[in-house]
Image (cartoon, grey):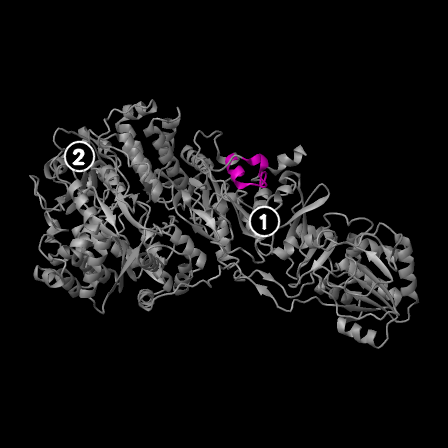
Amino acid sequence: MRLLREIAEMEERRILFEGIDTPDIDRWPVYCKHGGGQGLLRARSLSPENVIKEIQSARLRGRGGAWRLVGDRWQQAQAEGGADYVVVDLLEPDPGRFRDRKLAERHPHRLLEGARIAAHAVGATSIFLCIDAESLRARQALQQAIVATQEQATTIQLHPARGPFPLAAGSSLAVELLRGGRAEPQADDGVAGLDRLFAGSAIVHSASTLGYLPALLATAGDVFQTVGSEWAPGTQAFCVSGLVRRPGLYEVELGRGTVRDLIEGIAGGARPERAIKFVLHAGYGSSPVLTAGDLDRPLDPGLWADPAGGPLSGVFGGGAVIVADDSVCPVDTARRLAQAYAGAACGKCLPCREGTAWLAAALSRLEAGTAQANDLAWIIQRCNHLTPAVALCGHAPSAARSIRALHDAFPEEFAAHLDGGCAVAKDLSMKVPDSIHMRY
Amino acid sequence: MNQGRPEAAARPVVPEELADRAHAIVAAYPEPKGALHPLLDLVLSETGSWDGTWAGWVAQLTGTPVVTVHGIARSRRLPEADGEEIAVCTGLSCRWMGAEAVCQRLQEVPNIRVVAVNCLGACSAAPAMARNGRLHDGLTPERLDALVAGDR
Amino acid sequence: MATVRIHIDGEPVDVDAGTNLLMALLDAGHAMAHPCFHPSLSAPASCRMCLAAEEVGDSLRLITTCNRTVVEGQRLSLSHPQAVAARSGVVEDMLLRHPAECAICERAGECEVQEAVFVHGNGATGATLPGRRKKVELGPRLILDRGRCILCTRCVRFEAEVSGTDALAVSGSGADAVIDTCGAPIAHDMTGNLLDLCPSGALSEPGERLHAPAWQMTGISSTCPGCASGCATRIDVANGRVQRVKPRSDGADAQGYWLCDVGRYGWQAETERLTTPQLRGTAVEWDAVFAEVAEHMEQARRGAILLSPFLSNEEAFLLGHLARRWEADLFLWQATDPAGDRVWPTGFTIRAERGPNRAGVRAVTQALDLPLGDGAALERRLGAGDVDALFAVGGSLHGETPEVTVPDELFLAVQDVQPSTWIRNPDAALASSSAWTEKEGTFVDGLGRLQRVRAAVEPPGEARPDFWILAALWHGGPNRDSPDQAFSRLSRSSSSGSFAHLDYGILESRQRPAEGVAFGGGWTSQLQRRGLIAVEDHAKRR
């Protein structure tokens, strides 16, 4: 498998995945031999307050996609009397995102060490790792790592749950899975604070966020001093997939290069005789679709997050980069996304349950050339309607944003489909045979 | 007052080893209800299908109403009861990288049911498929043929 | 209680601290559809209908109002274009699969989906999805039409939080999610409330389609005679017939928004009615019966009157006076469920004391300073041959019977709803009114609350209201005496007792009646009263 092996022109900078190519790094003695465990040792020699201060000054932001400052969240948690549980969210239902599971699979001790540091900082004694039950490799690696490092101070429990899971559902989804409820997020009730879990409280972190903690603690935050942008120090591991020469998981410094450097440099650019058509910069909701002309955006979430950021404004996302070349039909892509979102919808909130199902049906008609005259107008109208707050979580809004963005980037191709035309020769953006049962 | 509860009489025969594992899982949670999803997964992966009689068992272990267990189980990805199943990833990358060809090739193999699934998380090594929970990625026609031939 | 001030579309509104934000909006008279919200259930905020724009600094953000409490200084805009568009968009989402079959829907006219379309919809929808066409039976009295279901989960939450039976769950995910019992039928004594809760007509009872439509029904406020809990009810009448009984949640007199199935369906059980007055098994005119009863009771040396806990205070008052005139002794039997009180998780109670007005009958005899014996005392007197004429009134509401054996030789007059099965064939049978739907007067329930009971329909055939019969016996023939007047006399005669200084006017002012066009269950009828459902228009049209 092609993971981090082919180094391209643009430099990779590994903090999260540091040492991942070391053979047997998933074994505890090997991990220790290569400096593993130092971060936790140092963290435990400090008071939780000092750990929080260090993370605050390092300005570590959550890598799940919301990019909130981890240190500030911990401080708030401490103000509430600390959290009883650290919940690690490894669910990653987003299309094109597999970073957390890779981390768990290849570098499990790093994840566990990070989770233990977080537990020390917020005063938790239990850690739950919430993971898709069907990610067998990651489960196995984590289970072995848990057994190898059992200790009294903090218990770690793997919490496998079967999918499907709604995308961009926020932290309450993992908490609800732990409560033994339906795989549904909870509505925002305007009350700030920690999630309630069992008789106590829980703080939820993405696995990748925690993966930075060992390095940060071991170096007293030095590692973020020189790496990354001012708004978001450090690196981001991008899951580059789709139609590029070297798809893979690449960790690069934030604020250094552009999307083009990542795709055309490290990932090798388009395949021979093909040109990049658009890029879905996704994961945790979706951001505007980048067309070939948009690729010079800097890889700095701070610039994207600014609502007044003009053409840059959008959601930086959680690191999934899906590249399509000129053999791909954007209508087919929209249809496939809509189907995936409809299939993964939990069904709790009305606009998403009905809306995503309708979008999938309408886009299927459009793609097949059997759309009714108003369908395209209605697709856009429904997409505009499905904004955050209208739906209970980020699932439907992110579907709507992706579909809307694909339409805005390629309006002619969408319009052409109304008359049954498709500008793309369908050699690759093909359909799965009808005889195959679809399941999500 | 309990007339609304489904009859939990049809209890499955639970192998001792499975029961021990289940109890160990329940013990890992401050409240037994927390173990519901892991127990569902345990039943599904051990039995290969969701048979309603298990709902009563899981309900009893977790202190959850039987109907709730049923409802949650039926909202999860459930394996089919019969035959071998291969899940072919049809996420964007896998589609673009040849999931169709994988499906077509597999359909020619007798006694295998092919289902298309959303994403197996192997996007950078597309196309991918999962067989009996084991992931096979970076599929090429040769690898696929070897995989199919290896079993038959 | 501390109040907080919020601003709704610029208007300042003061509400109690801790008030639910949606309730504050509704109380302030703002129309807001909320298919998933119910004031007595938890709020999942899943229908996303009650959206309002909240001003935060210079910017606006949409919030759901049902799962928040009021915050001091909060500024909400309901009429902001963004909020209006969002709500109408959610209505459209709701209609994507909801069948447009209002013309044949049982719930038409009292449907919260319709209400949402009227209040928030913007006219037309261009998008539809093929719906589900599946009806399933959830229990003996419940049918679920999954095509109409909008998955608000009120029923699931009711079964978890109120009935405590956890009989329902959401099964499946996404667009395939359905409400399901997973095979086990729902059968407990609170199932009728699910009909009231359902906002969309997805839950109905067998035969409900044969009811008159909601806009033809008139609701009569009454009190449930099913037990001593004294739940407030609304009897819906159309075409001169009772169509259904619903809970009425207007004051402290109700048990929340709920009514048990005993109270809801009890009236349907009285199928075999006594429809003519009879003397020794032969139908006669009322005058003949009055003369016969009066003669025997007056001549009796040791007359006795058996009162029932199903009598109203006014009826007991007249019987007290008759007892004085006839020099008869009074006895009161008790209807008790041997299983004891049945208490649901939220405290909802079906009392072991089945008689709705035992406390009232006792209070009336006390006010009249008359001694009152119990059923056992009467039994002893009968056994000793110490009674030569017995007038037994009211009874068989639940088929409960006083345990008395009446010897053949004494004169027996029975005033009852059904041909009497609990006592030997009477010499005189007085066909009277059902306490469920035909009684006018007042009850005192097990908590000592005095409440009005109202007649919704006339007794069938020659049967007459108990009060009319007793007043005729008192006055020597049919007359215009009314429960209202009797109550005033009762009030005057008990200068310091339970009924002092009260009259129907005062009672009416304390109890908020539900007269007018009937609408849904307790919660919907509240909305109706708040003017949020176009009741007035319906009323004018009729």
In the drawing, does residue A112 fall left or right of residue C438? left
Residue furthest left as drawn: A9
Of residues C270 and C111, the one drawn nearer to the viewer in this rendering: C270
Of residues A357 and B54, the one drawn nearer to the viewer in this rendering: B54
Q: Is residue C361 above or below residue A224?
A: below
Q: Secondary structure at mark 1?
A: helix
Q: Secondary structure at mark 2?
A: loop
Q: Is residue A196 magenta?
A: no
Amino acid type shown at disc 1: Gly
Q: Is residue C110 magenta?
A: yes
Q: Which residues are magenta?
A: C101-117
Q: Residue at x 11, y 39 (%)?
A: A266
Q: Residue at x 35, y 33 (%)?
A: A383
- Give the labeled residue for mark 2: A297
Disc 2 with disc 1 on a shared chain: no
Q: Residue at x 19, y 42 (%)?
A: B126
> Residue A188 placed where, x, y %?
37, 48
* Residue C2 in view of the camera: no
Q: Quote the CA–CA distance across marks 2 and 1.
A: 58 Å
The quarter of the image holding the C terminus of chain A is top left
- Give the labeled residue for mark 1: C522
Q: Which mark is residue C384?
A: none
> Residue C368 placed where, x, y %?
80, 65
